[in-house]
């Protein structure tokens, strides 16, 4: 059957795209590999999974009634509550009936004769649509490292990014945790609570700020709801899509006492805000050092064993240039007698046996292995589908030297295809929910404009995409982000992946202005054609 639109994904971006398609009166099919809605919040149901952006900001703004009706219970919502919210949204706007769940898209190709995308699925179905909206997520293609001997391991194996529905029981078990990014740092304290022993295998340490989570009081909720319109107004063109701003003065211009106070305040506010205490913190190494030294002093305070504390302090990146983590008692977990840290930079893993992980120095018995090893981020979900354009151009070839996009949304040679939250957009550096809303609104305005003109095909001009991609790289070059050697922002966590800084660091508000300008200038940079 031919649809106007196919939406791949039922996470924040996919559900909103579905809602926009339905309200625009378009015929639409949604496809998602999961058994239900939720996207990343469906799969990442590991204990401790929580958002590091405040719940009242990390939620849709498009419907006032939805905003008024839904009441977040905590400042930083946990995965079950975020999933319940997305299920509520799906029901409230009757979105589920448009989806094929439990279905993966295996390939997609643009058929020049009919001017449609033809999508093949894991269930053997073929679907066609004029427009293909890929809300496939920037952190959804799971990285499953092929440790030598892993197939011999006789114990249980889990991935935080594909956690089973039925919670595993680690009581009395010797658990090995591989990976110390945001997911590993969140899950470690909870694994330690039930396991007989926890061994954390750390390749690269990360900086983490404690999450000062607490329930919202009734009074706060009343005031938050009353002030929602203003809160959203302040977020609309803000650097990160939240109402928070940084100190206005560069770190060096603030006297040392005031500087320490600003850092203390940001540290106690929690979340990712610490990496933006000063406006120059991510562009000037001296300013970054001030914040970095503050954070490192906190790690040394929290961890009793000074050798372990030093191992937990990053050595390969300025603070904030890899996603800063947010934890609940992570560092203190290493003060527990049954928890140990293995520094893989000193003793790399050489193999896995039936019941242990072996490094160059020792053998660590494990009954269960938990991999919190991240994702083939930003590009992986889409290159695994590998869409093919009308002239036979495959995405994996088009992006062999790094992703090339126009506004992080469109890809030359792949007409009528939109990559939501993809490379070249601020996505992972901003409030993902408002980001999804602005991109989806832009896409539907473009579809309406194309149809109003009688155009059947819209495509990014190669020179416009090259210019945007150069701009994305140039903005990143002026920051410290490019110095983070092991960052997934650069694709450095995946063997063989071209190292290119993928997100747009120019800020959410600036990005939005670029998108507005293109739309207001008759979609300069795009080619409209009719068949
Ligand atoms: O993944 P990661 P994540 N052997 O890539 C290690 C968002 N998120 O799922 O750095 C040994 O950050 C790898 O080591 P290295 C957030 O944006 C948000 O934790 O490559 N180790 C690293 O330590 C976040 O940034 C929230 O040297 C291996 C870890 O595995 C993003 O998702 C919560 C290895 C992977 O860390 C990704 O976070 C969770 C190997 N072969 C996630 N391969 C919140 O909102 C990889 N590693 C709070």
Image (cartoon, rainbow, N blue to C red):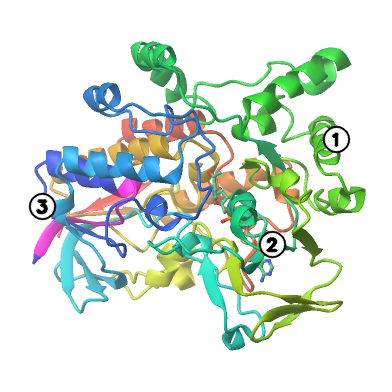
Determine whether 406 is above or below 53 in the image: below
- Residue at the farthest right position: 306
- When asked about the image quadrant of residue 171, the answer is bottom right
Marks 2 & 3, CB-CB < 8 Å contact: no
Considering only vertical position in the picture, is 230 above or below 361?
A: above
Instruction: Kindly identify which residue carries mark 2.
Output: 198
Foreground mark, 3 or 1, reads 1
Residue 167 x, y percent position in the rendering: 44, 60
Residue at x 73% of width, y 28% of height = 280
Q: Which secondary structure lies at badge 3?
A: loop
* Residue 312 picture location, percent across and down: 80, 51
Location of residue 71 in the rendering, given as x and y in whole percent from the top left corner = 33, 26
99 relative position to 142: left or right: left
Crowding near the residue tagged with mark 1, few <14, some 14–19, many ≥20 C-alpha atoms within 10 Å: few
2 relative to 429 in the view: left or right: left
* Residue to which mark 1 is pinned: 297
Mark 3 Cα-neighbour bin, 10 Å: few <14, some 14–19, many ≥20: some
Rendering quadrant holding ligand 1:
bottom right
Viewer-nearest residue: 519 or 44 = 44
Could one spot residue 255 in this view of the protein? no
* Mark 3 and mark 1: Cα distance apart in space: 57 Å
Q: What separation in Å lies between label 2 and label 3 (alpha carbons)?
A: 51 Å
**Numbered disc 2: secondary structure:** strand
Q: Residue at x 83, y 52 (%)?
A: 315
Q: Magenta stretch?
A: 2-14
Is ligand 1 closer than 8 angstroms to the Cβ of mark 1?
no
Is residue 119 among the parts visible in the rendering?
A: yes
Q: Earlier in the sequence, mark 2 or mark 3?
A: 3
Looking at the image, which residue sits at the far front? Answer: 172
Nearest to the observer: residue 24 or residue 391: 24
User: In the rendered image of this protein, does residue 185 appear above or below residue 495?
Assistant: above
- Residue at image mark 3: 27
């Amino acid at each position: 059957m031919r649809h106007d639109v196919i939406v791949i994904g039922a996470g924040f971006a996919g559900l909103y795209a579905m809602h926009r398609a339905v309200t625009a009166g378009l015929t639409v099919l949604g496809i998602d590999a999961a058994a239900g809605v939720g996207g990343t919040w469906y799969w990442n149901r590991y204990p401790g999974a929580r958002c590091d952006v405040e719940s009242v900001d990390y939620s849709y703004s498009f419907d006032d009634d939805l905003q008024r009706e839904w009441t977040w219970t905590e400042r930083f919502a946990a995965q079950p509550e975020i999933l319940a919210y997305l299920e509520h949204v799906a029901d409230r706007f009757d979105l589920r009936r448009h989806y094929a769940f439990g279905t993966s898209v295996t390939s997609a190709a643009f058929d020049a004769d009919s001017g449609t995308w033809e999508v093949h699925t894991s269930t053997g179905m073929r679907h066609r649509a004029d427009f293909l909206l890929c809300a496939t997520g920037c952190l959804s293609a799971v990285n499953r490292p092929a440790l030598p001997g892993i197939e011999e391991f006789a114990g249980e194996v889990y991935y935080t990014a594909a956690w089973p529905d039925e919670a595993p029981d680690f009581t009395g078990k010797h658990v090995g945790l591989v990976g110390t990014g945001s997911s590993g740092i969140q899950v470690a304290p909870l694994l330690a609570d039930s396991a007989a022993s926890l061994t954390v295998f750390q390749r690269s340490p990360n900086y983490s700020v404690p999450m000062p989570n607490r329930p919202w009081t009734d009074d706060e909720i009343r005031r938050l709801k009353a002030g929602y319109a203003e809160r959203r107004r302040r977020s609309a063109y803000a650097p990160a899509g939240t109402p928070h701003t940084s100190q206005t003065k560069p770190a060096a211009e603030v006297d040392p006492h005031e500087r320490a106070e600003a850092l203390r305040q940001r540290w106690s506010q929690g979340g990712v805000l610490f990496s933006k205490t000063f406006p120059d913190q991510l562009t000037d190494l001296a300013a970054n050092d001030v914040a970095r030294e503050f954070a490192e002093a906190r790690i040394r305070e929290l961890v009793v064993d000074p050798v372990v504390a030093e191992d937990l302090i990053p050595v390969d990146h300025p603070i904030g240039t890899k996603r800063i983590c947010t934890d609940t008692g992570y560092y203190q977990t290493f003060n527990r007698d049954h928890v140990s840290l293995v520094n893989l930079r000193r003793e790399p893993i050489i193999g896995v046996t039936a019941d242990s992980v072996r490094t160059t120095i020792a053998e660590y018995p494990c009954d269960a292995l938990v991999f919190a090893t991240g994702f083939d981020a930003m590009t992986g979900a889409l290159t695994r589908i590998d869409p093919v354009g009308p002239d036979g151009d495959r995405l994996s070839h088009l992006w062999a030297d790094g992703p090339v996009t126009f506004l992080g949304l469109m890809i030359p040679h792949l007409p009528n295809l939109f990559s939501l939250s993809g490379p070249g957009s601020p996505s992972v550096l901003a409030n993902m929910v408002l980001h999804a809303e602005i991109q989806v609104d832009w896409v539907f305005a473009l579809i309406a404009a194309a149809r109003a003109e009688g155009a059947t095909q819209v495509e990014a001009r190669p020179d416009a995409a090259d210019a945007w991609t150069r701009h994305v790289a140039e903005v990143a070059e002026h920051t410290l982000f490019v110095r983070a050697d092991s960052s997934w922002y650069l694709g450095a966590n995946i063997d063989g992946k071209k190292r290119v800084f993928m997100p747009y660091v120019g800020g959410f508000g600036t990005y939005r202005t670029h998108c507005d300008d293109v739309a207001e200038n008759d979609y300069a940079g795009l080619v409209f054609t009719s068949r």
